Image (cartoon, rainbow, N blue to C red):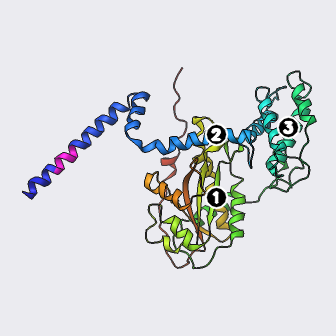
């Protein structure tokens, strides 16, 4: 009897699997059928909601600027790219200089204005832009409006202060060589291993801040940097957050500090940009981990799978995080226990990673 029931269950599982495969095959036939499939299967509903909430927050930020202004950051970067074009076209940026100037005016007129590098960067780039294009008929009125504004004064040092005085494009030769050879950098990459066992001591927050400062220099689409580093440097808090992720069983209890890297969808209005939070945050995360290694800290990136129950638990545990911000990954940080082991983790060979000159379609 038991054998018959076991065979029946096995047959049922196989039948269900075949039906699922058929449904997937039919659904993959068109975009419409795929969308209908995910109406029934709600795996992506949290991403859908987060994108919409991000769009609402994006518009709110334009009307009432507070902190960083994504539209301003993007358009100022677009103006920079126009300045560096060879040959430079004059005028350029005509299609979006109006909305850029409106965003700048609202930002500098805001009662909550704090003199930040973002505001000063916008000021200097706009000043340079109007010195280049201000005599063009299409731009004259915008220049007059810019000149009439009350601009923020003063300065705040940033990573590029030693290179240029004003926050405008500069030549490659202005940069000093770091002196780091490929061999030294490769050694750093070998040294940075995913470390899961740490000494029982508190992590110096100033070292984490230094690593985040280096991470802020990672590439970012239109310089929007759509992420935040949530730092938990109390061990009990670090453990509580780490236990939400899969794969931390057995070592979460002794993580001295944890980074929850979250993406901010309020930096975008278009659905097409929704994946940039993952790209930009990943670039910043790798830079952070390399920087941490140079500061004597070891790290372990912890995968954050898109599981509804875990994500709900994250928002409940950290209620200050709004729903338009999505968890991307966790990073354990601490002083490595020198006697503990690290997985060997063989890497793929070059010929499995690099595809040289893939054939293009003939037109």
Comes first in the chain, label 1 or label 2: 1
Among numbered discs 3 and 2, the one appearing first in the sequence: 3
Q: Is residue 206 left or right of residue 322?
A: right
Query: Is residue 190 visible in the rendered structure shown here?
Result: yes
Query: Residue 300 versus residue 106: which sits nearer the camera?
Result: 106
Residue beneath disc 3: 126
Q: Is 352 placed above or below 346 here? A: above
- Asked which secondary structure carries label 2, the reply is loop
Mark 3–mark 2 distance (CA, rounded to whole Å): 22 Å
Farthest residue, direction left: 1
For marks 1 and 2, give the CA distance.
19 Å
* Disc sitting over residue 72 in the figure: none
Task: Kindly identify which numbered label has been placed on residue 229.
Answer: 1
Most foreground residue, 122 or 291: 122
Residue interval drawn in magenta: 9-14
Instruction: Report the side of 137 relative to 33 (left or right).
Output: right
Q: Which mark is residue 268?
A: 2
Q: Nearer the viewer, residue 22 or 311?
A: 311
Residues tagged 1 and 2 counted as in contact (Cβ below 8 A): no
Q: Residues within 10 Å of mark 3 (few under 14, many from 20)?
A: many
Q: Quadrant of residue 61?
A: top right
């Amino acid at each position: 009897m038991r054998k018959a029931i076991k065979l029946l269950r096995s047959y049922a599982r196989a039948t269900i699997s075949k039906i699922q495969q058929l449904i997937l095959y039919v659904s993959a036939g068109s975009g419409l059928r795929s969308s209908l499939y995910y109406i029934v299967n709600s795996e992506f509903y949290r991403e859908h909601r987060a994108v919409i909430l991000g769009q609402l927050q994006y518009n709110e930020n334009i009307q009432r600027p507070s902190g960083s202004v994504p539209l301003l950051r993007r358009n100022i970067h677009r103006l920079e790219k126009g300045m560096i074009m060879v040959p430079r076209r004059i005028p350029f940026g005509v299609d979006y200089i109006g909305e850029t100037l409106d965003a700048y005016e609202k930002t500098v007129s805001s009662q909550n204005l704090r003199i930040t590098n973002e505001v000063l960067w916008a000021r200097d780039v706009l000043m340079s832009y109007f010195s280049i294009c201000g005599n063009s008929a299409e731009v004259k009125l915008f220049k007059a409006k810019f000149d009439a504004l009350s601009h923020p004064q003063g300065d705040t040092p940033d990573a590029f202060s030693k290179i240029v005085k004003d926050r405008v494009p500069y030549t490659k030769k202005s940069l000093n060589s770091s002196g780091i050879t490929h061999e030294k950098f490769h050694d750093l990459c070998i040294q940075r291993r995913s470390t899961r066992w740490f000494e029982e001591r508190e992590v110096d927050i100033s070292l984490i801040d230094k690593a985040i400062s280096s991470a802020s220099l990672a590439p970012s689409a239109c310089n929007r940097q759509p992420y935040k580093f949530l730092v938990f440097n109390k061990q009990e808090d670090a453990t509580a957050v780490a236990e939400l992720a899969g794969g931390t069983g057995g070592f979460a209890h002794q993580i001295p500090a944890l980074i929850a890297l979250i993406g901010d969808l309020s930096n975008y209005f278009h659905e097409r940009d929704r994946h940039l939070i993952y790209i930009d945050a990943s670039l910043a995360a790798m830079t952070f981990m390399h920087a941490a290694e140079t500061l004597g800290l070891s790290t372990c990136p912890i995968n954050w799978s898109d599981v509804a129950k875990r994500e709900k638990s994250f928002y409940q545990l950290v209620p200050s995080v709004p729903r338009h911000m999505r968890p991307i990954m966790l990073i354990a940080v601490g002083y490595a226990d020198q006697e503990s082991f690290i997985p060997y983790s063989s890497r793929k060979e070059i010929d499995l990673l690099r595809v040289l000159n893939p054939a293009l379609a003939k037109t």
